[in-house]
Amino acid sequence: MSMPPGFAYASPEQVMKDRADYARRNIARGKPIVALEYTEGVLLLAENPSSMLHKVSEIYDRIAFAGVGKYDEYERLRILGIRQADLKGYAYSREDVTARSLANLYSQVLGEVFTTSLKPFEVEILIAGVGEEPSGTELYQVTFDGVVTDQHGCAALGGQSDALRTFLNERYAATPDLSAAVKLGLEALRSVSSGELGVEGLEAAVLDRGLRRRKFRRVTDDEVSSALS
């Protein structure tokens, strides 16, 4: 059967490829984030010149969220995660809210948007969680198409993430202290930064299992400077 004039056909494979290329290209423009497990929890370190817009945030008692890409889209995902965590924690138990369950939620949402919407989300996110013991640490990376990857020790997302992973995998040693984790994280970010990256251009936070209930806290510039010295 002949096609009508002006009709352009694209195979489903080509459509998916174009969407994936579009998302990857825009995510790669985002400032990178690294996550490193250390003795007392997880460090999240982001290149972020803005003091008003956060790339790293708390979702629940023991769970943190980090996102790169289009800010309004990963902010919508963050809020969705907070609401779902609050509902589940209220209906069942706070212990039932886990990083894995939130990663599965984000996988479903991003996967559905990628396959059914004209434009995919231009985001890549990381869900981190800590338990009372080091064995309870969780790191889940979720891509724009809903693929979930379980990370161990360290993770990187955003611009030049492949180079960051290579850098970290070559230098990361299990269970460093916080100062060592900060130094390694900053060295990794500087290795792919186009400019001179200083403490004022960083956003840092930790999930510290030593805290009583809420494990998330932000790391100040003074603490980062002290760790580097």
Image (cartoon, rainbow, N blue to C red):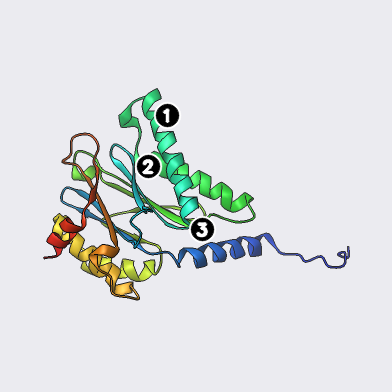
Taking the spot 32% from the left edge, 66% from the top edge, the residue there is 165
| Residue 211, quarter of the rendered image | top left
Q: CA distance from mark 1 to mark 3?
A: 27 Å
- Is residue 93 visible to us here? yes
Taking the spot 37% from the left edge, 42% from the top edge, the residue there is 100
Q: Return the disc, 1 or 3, that comes first in the chain's sequence.
A: 1
Q: Nearer the viewer, residue 27 or 197?
A: 197
Q: Look at the picture and state if 38 lies above or below 26.
A: above
Q: Look at the picture and state if 68 lies above or below 187.
A: above
Residue with the mark numbered 1: 87
Q: Residue furthest top?
A: 91
Taking the spot 63% from the left edge, 51% from the top edge, the residue there is 117
**Discs 1/2, front:** 1
Kindly identify the amino acid type of the residue bearing the numbered disc 1: Leu
Dot 1: element: helix
Residue 122 circle label: 3
- Is residue 176 visible to us here? no
Q: Look at the picture and state if 104 lies above or below 29.
A: above
Quarter of the N terminus within the rendering: bottom right
Whether residue 177 sits left or right of residue 150 in the image: it is left
Kindly identify the amino acid type of the residue bearing the numbered disc 3: Glu
